[in-house]
Image: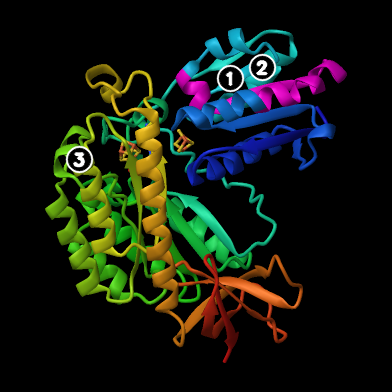
């Protein structure tokens, strides 16, 4: 098996991006080279997402679009991996017979034998979930060509059981990765010239690793990560409001290289809806966490996720979401229409009773409000100076560079001979809806 080529396409969240790098690493050790050109691959893997129905529809569409490749080169193997493979199992192959390999998120070590099985003409399937797998010993093959920022997965799975969410079913129970392997991965990235690391998990602040009477929690891990090198920026995502402790906020405040940004999904501003969602906090409790962030880390940006039109949501509940957003003054948000996922608690126990046109209208109101808040957040930065880590050339102009502030806002400025991977102080002079514009001082 010399020099076969694998092409991998990744959908869904940052966790899937990190997993694809683990997959390429496992395959590399078994004679596969990664290619960015689907036409030259003997193995095509689609790393999938199930979070909303439209995420799955996109993948069915993609499989249709690549089915001609299988006719052209009958020997190629097309595999579906990740969350949708886990959710739908063998039924994927019944629906789309170009798929001959399925691997769930905890089955990637088994890929070499699954591929061998598929090569011999069989359908190869492993969708077993694990209580231990964290891929701790595998060093991911970085596929991002810029070489400045990177993801490091610190835990897998989720124990939260939010009523609407498919993640606990497709990713299994929560487990934390051994801290030594996390820190050595960060050091390794540092040695390769990387300057920013995002610690990843579905709920990073419930990270807990215990061994022989000694345990490391998320604030402890974050501190160890920050101490690797003051020139390495540390970010993390996602945090669950119920686990956001003052201890964590104090660690962030203490280390300037821990970025001033917290993604703290609210989902809804109505305590009644939050209870139905099984989020384990109320509107008031969430507001107190935001106040704690504002008092302990005054320059911290805050972003959120919002779901519009969850089961039984009334106009009054929706208005509470809008007023919470306004009060919090989010810098950024991901906003979604509720999509019922089979097998979840909401699908089993509640009626998806908000009509689609009402969901759409509420979502549009949420988006319009967030656009206003995002614009306000950027305007407030005009006239201030921020440290920016340069990530790339600007997409629009060769002579300009782009990077992000600690608060995770994109800034664009004239290059003045500076290069990616460097830190510069940028004075913000204006902004567009998506970007801060400035100059190096
Ligand atoms: N673990 C993260 C989020 C993972 S999913 C957290 O708890 O914050 C990312 C976002 O997708 C969620 O925050 C939620 O806003 C949205 N989402 C999840 N399930 C959904 C569903 N069934 N319909 C619509 N949006 C959903
Ligand atoms: Fe889903 Fe809730 Fe877990 Fe996030 S915390 S992955 S929304 S169950
Ligand atoms: Fe999607 Fe799986 Fe991530 S369902 S959001 S790719 S954990």
Query: x%, y% of residue 52?
Result: 44, 31
Residue at the extreme bottom? 441
Read off the residue under disc 1: 102
Pair 3/2: label in front:
3
Q: Residue at x 38, y 41 (%)?
A: 361
Residue 155 visible in the displayed image:
no
Pick the front one: 343 or 142: 343
Read off the residue under disc 2: 99
Q: Which residue is drawn at 55% across and 71% down?
A: 432
Q: Which residue is drawn at 65% across and 54% down?
A: 144
Decide which of tag 3 and tag 1 comes sooner along the chain. Answer: 1
Tell me the number on the disc at residue 274: 3
Note whether 146 is above or below 334 in the view shown.
below
- For marks 2 and 1, give the CA distance: 8 Å
Q: In which quarter of the image is ligand 2?
A: top left
Element type at marker 3? helix
Q: Give the range drawn in magenta.
A: 62-87
Pick the front one: 257 or 265: 265
Residue 153 visible in the displayed image:
yes
Determine the image quadrant of residue 440. Answer: bottom right
Note whether 372 is above or below 60 in the view shown.
below
- Report whether 348 appears left or right of 358: left
- For marks 3 and 2, give the CA distance: 39 Å
Element type at marker 1? strand
- Report whether 288 appears left or right of 134: left
Decide which of tag 3 and tag 2 comes sooner along the chain. Answer: 2
């Amino acid at each position: 098996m010399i020099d076969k080529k694998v092409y991998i396409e990744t959908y869904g969240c940052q966790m899937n991006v990190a997993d694809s790098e683990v997959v390429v690493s496992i395959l590399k050790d078994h004679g596969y080279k990664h290619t960015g050109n689907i036409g030259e691959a003997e193995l095509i893997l689609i790393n999938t997402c199930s979070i909303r129905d439209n995420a799955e529809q996109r993948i069915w569409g993609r499989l249709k679009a690549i089915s001609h490749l299988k006719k052209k080169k009958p020997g190629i193997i097309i595999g579906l991996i990740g969350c949708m493979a886990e959710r739908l199992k063998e039924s994927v192959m019944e629906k789309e017979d170009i798929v001959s390999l399925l691997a769930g998120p905890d089955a990637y070590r088994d890929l070499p034998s699954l591929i061998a099985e598929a090569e011999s003409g069989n359908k190869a399937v492993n969708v077993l979930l694990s209580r231990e797998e964290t891929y701790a010993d595998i060093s991911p093959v970085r596929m991002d060509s810029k070489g400045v920022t990177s993801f490091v997965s610190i835990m897998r799975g989720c124990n939260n059981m939010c009523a609407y969410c498919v993640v606990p079913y497709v990713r299994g129970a929560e487990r934390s990765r051994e801290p030594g392997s996390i820190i050595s991965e960060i050091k390794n990235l540092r040695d390769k010239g990387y300057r920013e690391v995002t610690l990843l998990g579905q709920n990073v602040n419930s990270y807990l690793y215990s061994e022989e009477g000694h345990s490391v929690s998320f604030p402890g891990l974050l501190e160890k990560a920050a101490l690797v090198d003051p020139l390495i920026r540390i970010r993390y995502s996602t945090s669950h409001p119920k686990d956001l402790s003052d201890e964590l906020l104090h660690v962030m405040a203490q280390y300037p290289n821990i970025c001033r940004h917290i993604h703290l999904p609210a989902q809804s501003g109505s305590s009644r809806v939050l209870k139905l969602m099984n989020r384990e906090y109320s509107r008031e409790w969430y507001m107190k966490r935001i106040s704690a962030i504002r008092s302990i880390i005054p320059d911290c940006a805050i972003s959120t996720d919002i779901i519009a039109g969850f089961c039984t949501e009334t106009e009054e509940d929706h208005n509470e979401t809008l007023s919470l957003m306004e009060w919090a003054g989010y810098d950024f948000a991901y906003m979604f229409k509720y999509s019922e996922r089979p097998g979840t608690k909401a699908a089993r126990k509640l009626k998806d009773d908000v009509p689609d046109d009402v969901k759409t209208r509420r979502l549009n109101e949420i988006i319009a409000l967030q656009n206003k808040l995002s614009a306000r957040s950027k305007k407030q930065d005009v006239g201030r100076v921020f440290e920016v880590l340069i990530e790339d050339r600007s997409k629009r102009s060769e002579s300009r560079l782009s990077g992000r502030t600690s608060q995770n806002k994109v800034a664009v400025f004239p290059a003045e001979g500076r290069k990616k991977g460097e830190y510069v102080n940028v004075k913000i002079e204006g902004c567009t809806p998506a970007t801060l514009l400035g100059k190096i001082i």
